[in-house]
Amino acid sequence: MDAWWPLLVRAEFQPVLGPTLLDQIENDFPINDEPGHGVSGAHLGSSFDVGFYGIVQKDLRAALGNKVRGPLNRVYCGKGKRSACRAALQASLLQAVGESPQQVYPADSECAAGDQMCSDAIQFKPIGAISQPLIEWINRPTFQQADEIQSHGPR
């Protein structure tokens, strides 16, 4: 999915928007924030915290003919033709399957090319003179809370 996502988005929207407009949109609303290489530049894990996720889903539901609350101004995938949408998505998936791990996870100052675990790792911001090594990505909630119940309350 890491290889396919940016190709999927381009296959879905670029035929209607064109490469120049899609690039301009991506400057403000990134397609993907690749761990270690994206908008943030830091290793934030596989957080998928920016991008076209809801827009892609909404457009694909519309392309399938499903009722969509707050639809986009048109169906972008396949220029509104289901068979063209399917062909574009399949072609982008085949392209993604052909990419090597070194292409999908390029080297950076922390990780060797092709090392997905390192690429998806979380890097802490150092405070003062203390720094921490990368930690493996963990699927965790945005907000965490610990509660301690001392005793039963009145009934």
Image (spheres, helix red, strand yellow):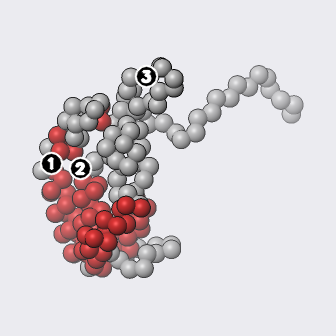
Q: Where residue 120 appears, x then y in whole percent?
A: 33, 36
Name the kind of residue labelled 3 in the image: Gln
Residue plotted at (37% across, 66% down): 25
> Which of 33/74 is in front?
33
The residue labelled by disc 2 is 3
Marks 2/3: CA–CA distance: 29 Å
Residue plotted at (36% across, 42% down): 41
Q: Quadrant of the C terminus?
A: top right
Image height of 19 relative to 150, above or below: below
Marks 1/3: CA–CA distance: 32 Å
Q: What kind of element bears circle 1? A: loop
Mark 3 surroundings: few (<14), some (14-19) or many (≥20) residues within 10 A = few
Q: Which callout, 2 or 1, points at the residue further toward the start of the chain? A: 2
Name the kind of residue labelled 1 in the image: Glu
Query: Which of the 4 image quarters holds residue 63?
Result: bottom left
The residue labelled by disc 3 is 132
Residue plotted at (40% across, 32% down): 122
Q: Where residue 11 appears, x then y in whole percent?
A: 24, 66
The residue labelled by disc 1 is 99
Are the two marked residues, 2 and 1, in contact with CB atoms closer than 8 angstroms?
yes
> Which of 31/110 is in front?
110
Task: Indicate left or right for 91 with 69 as reference.
Answer: left
| Farthest top residue in view | 130
